[in-house]
């Protein structure tokens, strides 16, 4: 039922997808401009280097000879590519400081961009909650400004934890699967295992953080109380929430890959922001259902908590008066 309710809430709030898209495009353009301005001198220097041009030229000649069937020249071309590549590595060793600064810039821009994106997610969740609770059509921008303080504090905690967690999982699994298991496993099996681990790891993270935003927005808890609440798993049916997140992430992954392949990436302008909206919808639906709070699924449907006690004869014949 959670999937049904989540889908209906998502459709009822689909218009927020376009606001998420615009907001994320603005963030992407600003972050892209900063990265371009900071890294373009370094990248241009590498692209203009003789060693890299010889590597690229050698690869081009190798492919042309291979396609034309000139296999006799492949050995000499491969040798030239290896020599040019060795020279390119020597060139990179002389630019250690620039490489380090470039990595720092990328990490900093990524963290700031993720933080601003988190502000948008907070505002999106608040807009969805207003519609679920009151059928209120809250404007995205004013909601963002109104909740700026709470959203800022939330993201100052959530974003660093997420970045550290994702980095540790990604690096550890990449090393383990592609460097250790590739010795006796084919590449595509390693790729399959890597995707499986990433999906499971993200579902695990989302399971333990799913109640954070709803507790802040709907539960009106403070930052500390909501943080403690989200990691307290008593009575939260953790395995059910985890399995739902696994399925939800697989569906989202499939839709985005299909949009990438079938529409040459154009469809991802909708599927990517919609992915965040549907995850936030699920988190709120999960919170409302567990806390047994009534909410609007759409303008014609209200989801009410199930009564745990058996109604009396008088209650049965009187019916639901709410």
Image: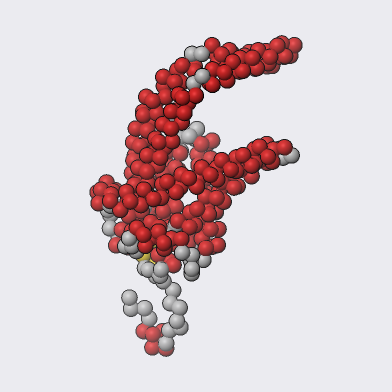
Horizontal and vertical percent position of residue 246: 55, 53
Q: Image height check: is 231 above or below 44?
A: below
Instruction: Give left or right: position of 302 versus 149.
Output: right
Q: Residue furthest bottom?
A: 313
Give the residue drawn at x 55%, y 62%: 239
Asked whether the viewer can see residue 254, the reply is no
- The residue lying toward the viewer, choosing from 276 and 163, is 163
Give the residue drawn at x 28%, y 49%: 148
Q: Image height check: is 4 above or below 321?
A: above
Give the residue drawn at x 25%, y 51%: 146
Horizontal and vertical percent position of residue 36: 39, 25
- The residue lying toward the viewer, choosing from 312 and 49, is 49
Horizontal and vertical percent position of residue 226: 38, 60
> Which part of the image, by quadrant, shows the C terminus?
bottom left
The mark tally for this picture is: 0
- Model colouring: secondary structure
Give the residue drawn at x 49%, y 57%: 207
Q: Quadrant of residue 225?
A: bottom left
Instruction: Give left or right: position of 146 versus 22.
Output: left
Q: Quadrant of residue 179?
A: top right
Asked whether the viewer can see residue 261, the reply is yes
Instruction: Give left or right: position of 30 versus 63.
Output: left
Q: Image height check: is 136 above or below 292?
A: above
Horizontal and vertical percent position of residue 88: 57, 17
């Amino acid at each position: 039922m959670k999937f049904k309710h989540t889908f209906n809430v998502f459709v009822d709030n689909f218009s927020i997808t376009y606001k998420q898209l615009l907001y994320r495009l603005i963030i992407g353009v600003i972050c892209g401009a900063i990265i371009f301005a900071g890294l373009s001198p370094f990248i241009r220097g590498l692209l203009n280097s003789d060693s890299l041009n010889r590597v690229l030229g050698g690869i081009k000649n190798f492919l042309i000879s291979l396609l034309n069937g000139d296999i006799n020249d492949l050995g000499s071309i491969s040798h030239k590519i290896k020599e040019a590549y060795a020279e390119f590595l020597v060139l990179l060793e002389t630019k250690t400081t620039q490489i380090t600064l470039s990595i720092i810039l990328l990490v900093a821009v990524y963290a700031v961009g993720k933080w601003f994106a988190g502000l948008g997610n907070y505002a999106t969740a608040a807009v969805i909650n207003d519609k679920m609770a009151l059928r209120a059509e809250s404007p995205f921008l004013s909601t963002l400004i109104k909740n700026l303080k709470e959203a800022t504090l939330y993201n100052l905690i959530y974003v660093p934890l997420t970045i550290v967690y994702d980095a540790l999982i990604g690096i550890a699994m990449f090393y383990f699967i592609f460097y250790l298991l590739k010795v006796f496993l084919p590449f595509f099996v390693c790729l399959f295992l890597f995707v499986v681990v990433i999906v499971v790891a993200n579902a695990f993270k989302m399971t333990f953080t799913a109640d954070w935003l709803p507790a802040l927005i709907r539960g009106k808890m403070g930052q500390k109380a909501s943080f403690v609440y989200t990691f307290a798993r008593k009575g939260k049916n953790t395995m059910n929430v985890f399995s739902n997140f696994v399925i939800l992430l697989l569906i989202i992954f499939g839709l985005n890959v299909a949009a990438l392949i079938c529409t040459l990436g154009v469809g991802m302008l909708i599927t990517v922001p919609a992915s965040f909206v549907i995850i936030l919808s699920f988190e709120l639906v999960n919170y409302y259902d567990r806390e047994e709070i009534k909410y609007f699924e759409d303008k014609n449907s209200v989801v009410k908590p199930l009564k745990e006690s058996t109604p009396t004869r008088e209650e049965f014949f009187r019916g639901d008066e709410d």
